[in-house]
Amino acid sequence: MARSKEAFVWKDGNIPDCKVHSKIKLDLLRTYLLSYFNTITANPKIDAINVHLIDAFSGGGILKDSITKELVSGSPLVMIQSVIESCNLIGAQRKKPFRINARYHFADIEKSATNKLLEVLSDLDLLREIEPHCLNIDTLSFDKFLPVVLGRIPSKQKTKAIFFLDQKGWSDATLIHCNQILSHLPKAEIIWNISIESLATFANEDDKFRNSVKKFGVELDDAFTSLPSYSHYSDWRKSLIALFLKQIRANCIAQYVSPFMIQHDGWGYWLLHLSNHPQANNVMKGTHWQHHNGSLHEGFPGLKMLEFNRENWNHTRMWRFDEEAESATHDALVDELGQRIKALQGDPTVSSLLKSIANDTPADYPRIFQSLDTLRRESGLSIRGMNGEIRRSIPQSEDDVLILPKNKQLILPKTID
Ligand SMILES: C[S@@+](CC[C@H](N)C(=O)[O-])C[C@H]1O[C@@H](n2cnc3c(N)ncnc32)[C@H](O)[C@@H]1O
């Protein structure tokens, strides 16, 4: 069996295996990109968009399904194919010609990978789809590539960019790097792979590990000396993971961070999504729900789904974005949304509610809207349009307002912590 260091090598005719979790990750990337393009072109007047797509751990563009042995498109090909597919789908609904002006920035530390990528793009005739100045392929390690790519993309408030940081472990693409990207390009989104279980497994008290973690952008503090670390080894691992997530969310300059995991057969992976736009966060959550069992989350339902920490880890549950998770999420939201609407004061808009809960719930907008409809039917919540129109089902616009019944008791949760 290939050792992990050799697992991603594209030389001497070798095509690396695409394991189940990698396949799920690539499917999620494809679904996300298709939904992304669909969402940002919702206005039919838009006839062209400009976007930078950055794959900093690109590999050689082609993999082999570890079960069926069929060839599988790697992440740079998924990016290009998603642009072509989106362009065709969106263009078919437009009267005027529609274009996605995508600029691709691919890089890998291994020359064999970047050589193979160029060969695959040429073999599949994809180079004809891309203007030469719109494609860069660099053989560079991520820390060297990042300043190069940020130098190529001018720093502008509105520049659209999606970074895919598909590192193998956890220490090549760090929180510090992500913050550099987001301060240069505030509208960028980052899909960031972190092998969190390998981090927890190899964690130790040496200064070397502590320094690597610091370089990542997290302070370990008392992670090794706190009570859970004395009681159970497994508690200690979980508490370390919770500490990482808490600090990533606190220290990251992205306003929205979704912390879901990929279904795996070995090490547990996070596929974090960082963005400054609530709609982007919503689209990523919708992508996880679409993939059901491919995604995982260990947490609580409703608005507390992500509130796990070093003390309560053992009470968390494994969620698979399936029917069970769906109904638990609905019930918990029905219990908890009233209080959150009340906390927003006045008659808040749907938009302000969505922004305020985006980091607290795995529910995407359709699921939140269903819970608001249940509250409307069962607890007297009134949903009204900007001109006072009464909504008789789910909200029709993010500008709709939410009006709690005068007798606030009606809408308080059945169980209050
Ligand atoms: C998990 S594979 C990427 C697979 C690819 N994203 C896909 O889905 O088709 C990780 C890749 O990162 C490359 N790599 C490892 N360390 C790197 C670093 N520090 N900077 C850039 N690339 C690196 C490896 O050569 C390998 O091709």
Image: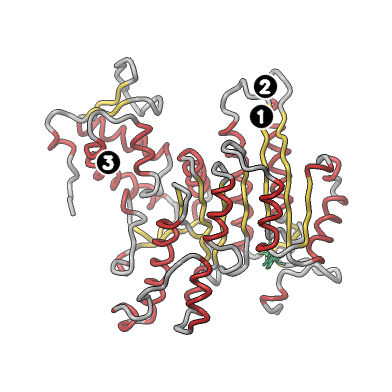
For the residue pair 253 and 238, the one nearer the viewer reads as: 253
The quarter of the displayed image where residue 298 is located: bottom left
Q: Tell me if label 2 and label 1 are in contact, CB under 8 Å.
A: yes
- Count of numbered labels shown in the rendering: 3
Residue 132 position in % (x across, y down): 84, 43
Q: Amino acid at mark 2?
A: Arg
**Is the distance from the Cβ of mark 2 to the nearest ligand 1 atom less than 8 Å?**
no
Sequence-wise, the earlier of marks 2 and 3 is 2
Quadrant, the C terminus: bottom left
Ligand 1 positioned in quadrant? bottom right
Q: Amino acid at mark 3?
A: Leu
Location of mark 1 (residue): 90
Location of mark 3 (residue): 337
Q: Secondary structure at mark 1?
A: helix
Residue 412 position in % (x across, y down): 17, 41
Residue 152 position in % (x across, y down): 71, 47
Q: Tell me if label 2 and label 3 are in contact, CB under 8 Å.
A: no
Q: CA distance from mark 3 to mark 1?
A: 35 Å
Residue sitting at x 39%, y 67%:
243
Q: Tell me if label 3 and label 1 are in contact, CB under 8 Å.
A: no
The quarter of the displayed image where residue 358 is located: top left
